[in-house]
């Protein structure tokens, strides 16, 4: 089990670092960037995990994974949508409202821009590789896609309310989640779907217990 977790973490990190390099400079255009509120005594990971942007990224992860179940999106549709790129095409394939997709993407971009602005160190992490991101980097998620959707759709009542039972290495998890969004935004209309896959890898790599143990395997 420990060996599988190490492999999963390596693949997750490879995805976030690789995918981030596909971002065009315009995606990271930050106007009047302020670095206020930084605490030099506390670690970057600790600070990021307590920001409203990070909490919103967590909400988006939950929302999109829920959509995969409610819309009955198959693995084939997921892959087609991720390759399509355009919001309208992604909406046609998945049945998710195009305005909702655009809103989720805009929220992700705002969260990422805000965090990159406040913590330039994150941007350096995101640009640490010259290899473009692609769907191959989501292989661990795609290999488990059908089982993940099945698990989410058959979860016992009240399972996801048991947040207190979930424990995370929040430092690593927060940075992982931010880099997942950082890379996903570059994929255009498919950003929420790609992010959901990357965020799942973060969750299963750095969190355990409660409902996390139910959906991660």
Image (cartoon, grey):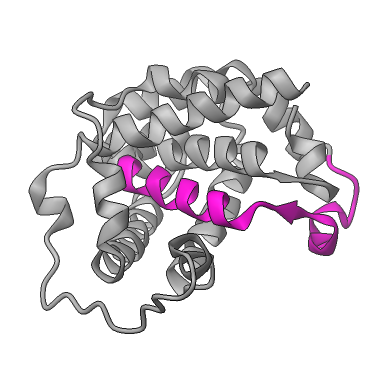
Where residue 189 sits in the image (x, y, percent)? 29, 42
Q: Where are the magenta residues, as a range?
A: 155-184
Which image quadrant for residue 133? top left
Tell me if residue 24 is in the magenta stretch.
no
Above or below, comparing residue 26 to residue 51 in the picture: above
Tell me if residue 177 is in the magenta stretch.
yes
Above or below, comparing residue 57 to residue 201 in the picture: below
72 vs 182, nearest the viewer: 182
130 vs 196, nearest the viewer: 130
Farthest residue to the bottom: give it: 37
57 left or right, relative to 32: right
76 left or right, relative to 137: right
* Quadrant where the C terminus is found in the figure: top right
Residue at image point 19% right, 41% down? 23
Where residue 199 sits in the image (x, y, percent)? 52, 43
Above or below, comparing residue 201 to residue 96 in the picture: above
Above or below, comparing residue 187 to residue 83 in the picture: below
Which image quadrant for residue 83? top left
Where residue 156 sits in the image (x, y, percent)? 90, 46
27 left or right, relative to 108: left
């Amino acid at each position: 089990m420990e060996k599988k977790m190490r492999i999963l973490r390596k693949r997750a990190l490879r995805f976030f670092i690789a995918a981030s390099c596909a971002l065009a400079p315009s995606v990271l255009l930050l106007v009047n960037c302020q670095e206020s509120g930084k605490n030099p005594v506390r670690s970057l990971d600790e600070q990021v995990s307590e920001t409203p942007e990070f909490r919103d990224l967590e909400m988006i992860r939950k929302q999109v994974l829920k959509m995969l179940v409610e819309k009955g999106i198959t693995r084939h549709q997921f892959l087609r949508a991720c390759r399509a790129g355009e919001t309208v095409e992604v909406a046609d394939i998945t049945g998710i409202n195009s305005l909702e997709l655009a809103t989720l993407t805009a929220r992700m971009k705002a969260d990422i821009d805000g965090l990159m602005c406040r913590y330039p160190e994150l941007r350096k992490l995101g640009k640490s590789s010259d290899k473009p991101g692609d769907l191959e980097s989501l292989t661990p998620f795609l290999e488990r896609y059908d089982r993940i959707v099945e698990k989410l759709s058959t979860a016992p009542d009240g399972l996801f309310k048991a947040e207190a039972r979930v424990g995370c290495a929040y430092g690593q998890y927060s940075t992982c989640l931010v880099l997942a969004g950082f890379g996903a935004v570059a994929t255009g209309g498919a950003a929420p779907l790609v992010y959901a896959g990357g965020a799942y890898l973060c969750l299963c790599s750095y969190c355990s217990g409660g409902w996390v143990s139910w959906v991660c395997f």
